[in-house]
Amino acid sequence: MTISLLVADDHQVVRLGLRNILEGSGIEVAAEATTGEEVLQILLNNKPDCVLLDVRMPGGDGLNILGRIKLDYPEMPVVLFSTYDNPTYVARAVALGAAGYVLKDDTPERLISAIQAAVRGEAAWTREELRRVTGALATPRVVSDVEVPLTQRESEVLRQLANGLTNKEIALALGISYETVKEHVQHILRKIGVSDRTQAAVWAVRKGLV
């Protein structure tokens, strides 16, 4: 039985490469999207067996699109596909219900097996990926129900942090100094009661901030 796949990636070379890699695997690229909004539009009319979703695309964060897919189509298997080996991304993907997270430099066999596992309703996470984010995912859920008095700027920094940006990238995005960002991050971690950025990202997901 052929698996129908929706591929969401803004690079044509990547999409063409995926078609070549998947040829003869029993997985057929049934639709392509270059933005998150295109993904959502396609899903209104077509229901593939699985979605392969790039983490960073124009016009939005792929992880936000993952959250919207899971809200509207909770049973839809979604595998994240990324250049970035970023524990914050992995933790958010797990928290949002992705079936797996495949790096673009992983082997074709890894990609194919992840898609096949997702369609079977199985998790396609490696032990190493889960080991890296176990601490973040173990952050008590009750914390997300407590009202935390973050300032507007701290909330902005937290959203950027949860999107996987470094302190330097956050400083550029918000037009503030690196040292100011560093100070805000320290205040955020203390206020929400977590010990690192990855835990803060998971907290932000559970709070609905990203």
Image: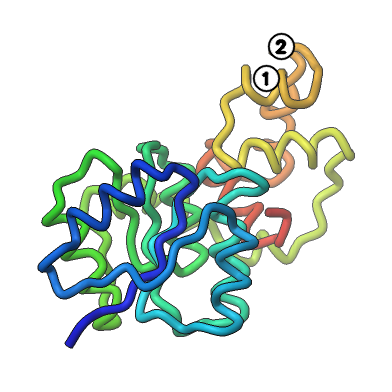
Gap in Å between the C-alphas at discs 1 and 2? Answer: 5 Å
Left or right: where does residue 56 sit relative to residue 180?
A: left
* Farthest-out residue, bottom: 1
For the C terminus, give its image quadrant. Answer: bottom right
* Element marked by disc 2: helix
Which of 72 and 42 lies nearest the eye of the viewer?
Answer: 42
Q: Is residue 77 left or right of residue 196?
A: left
Residue 182 numbered mark, or none: 1
Write down the residue under mark 2: 179
Residue 37's spot in the image, x, y percent? 64, 61
134 and 114: which one is in front?
114
Local crowd size for mark 2, using a 10 Å CA cut-off: few (<14), some (14–19), many (≥20): few
Residue 121: x percent and y percent?
A: 29, 82
x, y percentage for residue 92?
50, 54
- Which of the 4 quarters of the picture holds residue 4? bottom left
Q: Name the residue type under label 2.
A: Glu
Circles 1 and 2 in contact, beta carbons < 8 Å = yes
What residue is drawn where x is 41% and y is 45%? 12
Residue at 81% in and 19% down: 175
Q: Secondary structure at mark 1?
A: helix
Can you say whether 138 is above or below 78 in the image? above
Relative to 45, is 30 above or below?
Answer: above
Q: Residue at x 89, y 39 (%)?
A: 152
Q: Which of the image's four quarters has the N terminus? A: bottom left
In the image, 45: left or right of 155? left
Picture residue at 66% right of the left edge, 59% below the top: 143
Q: Which mark is residue 203?
A: none
- Residue 145 picture location, percent across and down: 73, 66
Q: Nearer the viewer, residue 203 or 157?
A: 157
Q: Is residue 136 above or below residue 76?
A: above
Identify residue type, mark 1.
Answer: Lys
Question: Callout 1: few (<14), some (14-19), or many (20+) C-alpha neighbours within 10 Å?
Answer: some
